Amino acid sequence: MAEEKVKGPASYFPSIEKNYGKPVEHWFKELETVVNLAHMEQVNHLKSNFAIGHGHANALVAYFRKSKGL
């Protein structure tokens, strides 16, 4: 059977790791430091402090928040 294609926010992970040179787990640890912020505040934190593009930041935050039940 063929491998199932990754969908949703996780589909961005290979590109994020390639573009920013760190595993996604690094960014999830960073998001732990701002876990109490709202979704867009977390996105803006990644964008303004680490120059992560909006789509990549949004994918990281969406995945992170879902994994935390937020």
Image (cartoon, rainbow, N blue to C red):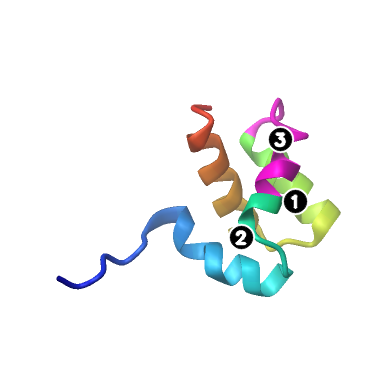
Q: Position of residue 24 (x, y in %)?
A: 62, 56
Q: In front of the other: label 1 or label 3?
A: 3
**Is 32 contained in the magenta span?**
yes
User: Is the C-beta separation of discs 1 and 2 under 8 Å?
Assistant: yes
> Hey, which quadrant is residue 57 in on the image?
bottom right
Q: Whole-Å distance between the Cαs marked 1 and 3?
A: 12 Å
Q: Residue at x 60, y 45 (%)?
A: 61
Q: Residues within 10 Å of mark 3 (few under 14, many from 20)?
A: some
Q: Position of residue 53 (x, y in %)?
A: 69, 63
Which residue bears the numbered disc 3?
32
Q: Residues within 10 Å of mark 2 (few under 14, many from 20)?
A: many
Label disc, if present, on residue 56 of the rendered structure = 2
Element type where label 3 sits in the image:
helix
Which residue bears the numbered disc 1?
46
Q: Residue at x 68, y 73 (%)?
A: 19
Tell me which numbered mark, 3 or 2, is placed earlier along the sequence: 3
Q: Whole-Å distance between the Cαs marked 3 and 2?
A: 17 Å
Q: Amino acid at mark 1?
A: Leu
Task: Residue at the far left: name it.
Answer: 1
**Viewer-proximal residue among 29 and 35:** 29
Element type where label 1 sits in the image:
helix
Q: Residue at x 72, y 70 (%)?
A: 21
Q: Which residues are magenta?
A: 27-38
> Hey, which quadrant is residue 13 in on the image?
bottom right
